[in-house]
């Protein structure tokens, strides 16, 4: 009986020694740059894996966000180009292979826009009436009419609006349980999101406003803005993330994170795709930003503080929200929630 206990007691110290040796090797790995280091887009990131001198790797594979981008057999520095990378957090992993086994170590960087956004102001070219009952969430222009989706439970409506009068010529009201949000036109359909539970995608016939279909919607934190570039939809969710959606299934296909040269830009709201760029209202501000849809970099910032000054706003008027682009006439329209006016504006570099 005593011999039965001797073997485990002898084996346990050997096992502990073996585990400690492996842990020591793993702990000895170090990967630079330090986690959380910030870089500007266009800068090269010097990546170096350090390990004990007696550790001879068969190979070292480097991954960026789980995709392999380089491999080495020694500890020489790897240079990561960032010119075309999407902005925001990027994970860098080194996998060291030796004798059929591997050890991993990961760090991360935050990629910022290469330069500060260009600053713009505006010029009002024309003023149109706007329905003060409209809590504007989505704003579109096509074929001589505005298409507006509005929010708030019991008041959420999809409207076709006469530009000159501000009056609705066609409407589709949502049930009182829904809070309407952003909208986009895809061919002969209008797509409209809702804000919170129940979160759905409504699909309307553009000509008749008949509800064609309803889909459950689970992308992002909440439903906010929506726009279409001719191939895919873009939507945001109250954060600094803009999601890509399939135009037919409304399922997520990718995303970008929006950053300027200092950090993330949160609360991105109503969206409009104009000549290859994304224009976005920033919730509860008087600013519109212009975003590179490939990288998330903020290219321009427009200050509209004096467009409808706070001191002159009616008691019911809310924040700036609503951007519509007349692609044929090259006209840009902006408004706000329950504002009495819709403004045709031109952005001018300061």
Image (tube, rainbow, N blue to C red):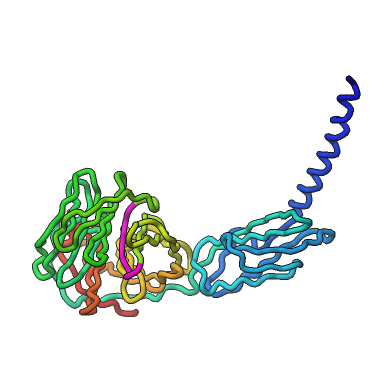
The residue located at (69%, 60%) in the rendering is 31
- Farthest residue in the top direction? 1
Place of residue 343 in the rendered image (x, y in percent of width and height, measured from the top left)? 19, 70
Residue 235, position in %: x, y?
35, 60
| Quadrant of image for the N terminus | top right
- The C terminus appears in which quarter of the rendering? bottom left
Q: Is residue 309 visible?
A: no
Q: Is residue 319 left or right of residue 66?
A: left
Indicate left or right for 216 with 262 as reference: left
Q: Main secondary structure of the magenta part?
A: loop
Viewer-side residue, 2 vs 198: 2
Q: Nearer the viewer, residue 245 or 176?
A: 245
Q: Position of residue 110 (x, y in %)?
A: 54, 63
**Of residues 66 and 248, the one drawn nearer to the viewer in this rendering:** 248
Is 326 covered by the magenta stretch? no
State which quadrant residue 243 falls in. Answer: bottom left
């Amino acid at each position: 009986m005593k011999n039965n206990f001797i073997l485990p007691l002898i084996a346990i110290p050997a096992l502990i020694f073996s585990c400690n040796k492996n842990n020591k090797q793993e702990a000895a790995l170090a990967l630079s740059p330090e986690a959380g280091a910030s870089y500007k887009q266009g800068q090269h990131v010097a990546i170096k894996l350090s390990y004990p001198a007696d550790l001879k790797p068969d190979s070292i594979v480097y991954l960026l966000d789980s995709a392999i981008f380089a491999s080495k057999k020694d500890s020489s520095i790897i240079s990561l180009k960032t010119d075309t990378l999407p902005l925001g957090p990027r994970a860098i992993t080194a996998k060291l292979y030796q004798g059929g086994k591997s050890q991993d170590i990961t760090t991360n960087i935050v990629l910022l826009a290469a330069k500060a956004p260009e600053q713009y102001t505006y010029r009002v070219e024309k003023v149109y009436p706007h329905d003060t009952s409209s809590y504007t969430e989505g704003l579109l222009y096509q074929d001589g009419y505005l298409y507006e989706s509005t929010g708030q439970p019991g008041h959420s409506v999809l409207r076709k609006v006469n530009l000159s009068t501000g009056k609705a010529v066609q409407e589709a009201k949502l049930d009182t349980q829904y809070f309407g949000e952003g909208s986009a036109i895809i061919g002969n359909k209008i797509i409209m999101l809702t804000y919170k539970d129940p979160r759905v995608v409504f699909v309307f016939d553009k000509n008749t406003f008949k509800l064609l279909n309803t889909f459950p919607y689970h992308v992002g934190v909440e439903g906010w803005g929506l726009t279409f570039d001719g191939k895919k939809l873009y939507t945001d969710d109250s954060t600094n993330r803009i999601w890509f959606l399939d135009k037919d299934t409304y399922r997520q296909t990718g995303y970008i994170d929006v950053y300027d040269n200092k950090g993330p830009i949160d609360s991105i709201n109503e969206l409009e795709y104009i000549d290859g760029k994304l224009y976005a209202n920033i919730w509860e501000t008087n600013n519109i930003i212009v975003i590179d849809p490939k990288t998330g970099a903020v290219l321009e910032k427009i200050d509209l503080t004096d467009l409808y000054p706070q001191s002159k706003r009616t008691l019911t008027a809310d924040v700036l929200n609503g951007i519509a682009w007349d692609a044929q006439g090259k006209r840009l329209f902006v408004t706000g929630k329950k504002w009495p006016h819709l403004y045709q504006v031109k952005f001018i570099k300061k």
